[in-house]
Image (cartoon, helix red, strand yellow):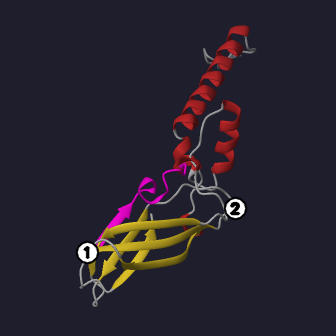
Amino acid sequence: MLSTTLSHPWARQSLTTSDVARGSVIVLLLTLLLGQWLFFNRTGLAGNPDWRPYVERFCSVFQCELPLRTELSRIELLNRDVRKHPLVEDALLVYATLNNSAEFTQPYPVFSISFSDIAGQPVAMRHFMPAEYLDPEVDSAAGMAPAVPVYVVLAIQDPGEDAVSFQFEFL
C-alpha cells in the first residue's frame, strides 16, 4: 500500500516567535491606521448623532478638538421685527431674538433674511455670518449657550416697495 499525505508549504504545526511578532505588528499598524482615519475624519463623524459619542471618547483620549454639535431645529426665533430706519433713508432696521433650546452649546447659525413680493416671489435675500450680527464683545467661537437669548439688531438696505413680506431662516 501506498500512503500519501497532502500538506501545503505554508501550513505549519506551530507558530514561531517571529510569526507572533509579525502578527502583532500588523494588528498595531491597522490600529494606528484606524486611529488616523478617525482623527482626520472626526469633524464629519461628529456631525452624525450615532457616531458623536465614540468620536468624543476618542478625542478625550487623544486630546483632539471637535466642532460644536449643531441642531438648527433647536434654534428658535422668539421675536422678530423689521421697520424703516428712523435716521437713514432707504434703510431698514431688523430686530430679532434668538434662543438655543437644545441642552448643549451649539455654533451660532448663519442668519438669513429674505423679502418677497405679493406673489411670493423673492425680491431680496441676505445671509449674515455670526460676526456680522453679534455684538463685538460676544465670542462667536464659544458658541450659543442653551436658554440664553441672543439679541440681533441689523441695519440693511430697503429692498423697495415690492417687498411686502419677510422671512428669517437659520443655515
Assess whether residue 107 is covered by the magenta stretch.
Answer: no
Label 2 and label 1: CA atoms lie apart by 41 Å
Q: Nearer the viewer, residue 15 or 94?
A: 94
Q: Secondary structure at mark 2?
A: loop
x, y percentage for residue 85? 35, 75
Q: Tell me which label, 2 or 1, sits earlier in the chain.
A: 1
| Residue lying at the far right of the rendered structure | 14
How many numbered tags mark residues here?
Answer: 2
Q: Nearer the viewer, residue 95 or 35?
A: 95
Query: Residue 90, labelled with which disc?
Result: 1
Residue 32, placed above or below residue 38:
above
Assess whether residue 127 is covered by the magenta stretch.
Answer: yes
x, y percentage for residue 41? 52, 40
Query: Residue 160, labelled with which disc?
Result: none
Q: Nearer the viewer, residue 89 or 59?
A: 89
Say if residue 80 shows up in the picture.
yes
Q: Nearer the viewer, residue 16 or 85?
A: 85
Residue pictured at 41% horizontal, 72% vertical: 94
- The picture quadrant where one finds residue 76 is bottom right
Q: Which residue is mark 2?
A: 103
Residue pictured at 38% horizontal, 71% vertical: 113
The magenta segment is: 124-139
Horizontal side of residue 121 vs 75, given as left or right: left
